[in-house]
Image (spheres, rainbow, N blue to C red):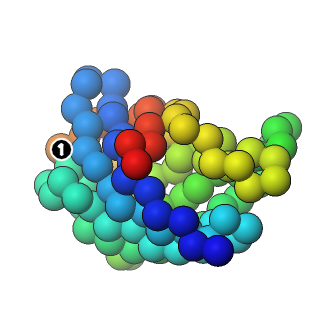
Amino acid sequence: MKSNFIVEIGDENGKSCKFAITTDGKTGIGSWRTIDKGFIKENSGWTQHFSANGTLGCHLQLAGGENKYGIQLNDWTYWMDFTNDQGTGWLSGGWAVGLRMGRISWIILG
């Protein structure tokens, strides 16, 4: 079953941007695109879950272009495919343009 989300990510300097994310709840395989342009290098790509060590959840990675994975949304899902409302993550230096690389926070807006 596909799920659609509008997600806002923010860096440690208080800058933020929005993404449209569509994923399959069980696999996390899906797609994403930027709503606000110019904050990261890539404009769209694919998503994938991977297990979060030591928890019952999964992180969601956003990938695209030659730099593969550039954004990680920690603890995106929890046990039994429950999607969390917010969390933390990271933005790789190769993708950072208008946002600061490193730690980020994220929240689902809709």
Q: Amino acid at mark 1?
A: Gly
Q: Does 87 sit left or right of 1 as displayed?
A: left
Where does residue 83 sit, x and y in percent of width and height? Answer: 63, 48
Vertical comparison of 3 with 99: above or below: below
Vertical comparison of 49 with 98: above or below: below
Quadrant of the image occupied by residue 31: bottom left
Where does residue 34 sit, x and y in percent of width and height? Answer: 27, 61
Identify the residue at horizontal 33%, vertical 34% (top origin).
10
Q: Secondary structure at mark 1?
A: loop
Q: How many marks?
A: 1
Identify the residue at horizontal 40%, vertical 48% (top origin).
110
Q: Nearer the viewer, residue 40 or 79?
A: 79
Q: What residue would you read off at disc 1?
A: 98
Quadrant, the N terminus: bottom right
Where does residue 46 sit, x and y in percent of width and height? Answer: 47, 73
Quadrant of the image occupied by residue 75: top right
Quadrant of the image occupied by residue 11: top left
Where does residue 23 sit, x and y in percent of width and height? Answer: 55, 68
Residue positioned most to the left: 38
Q: Nearer the viewer, residue 85 or 52?
A: 85
Residue 20 visible: yes
Residue positioned most to the top: 13
Q: Residues within 10 Å of mark 1 (few under 14, many from 20)?
A: some
Residue 94 visible: no
Identify the residue at horizontal 34%, vertical 25% (top origin).
12
Q: Does 49 sit left or right of 23 as displayed?
A: right
Identify the residue at horizontal 25%, vertical 25% (top origin).
14
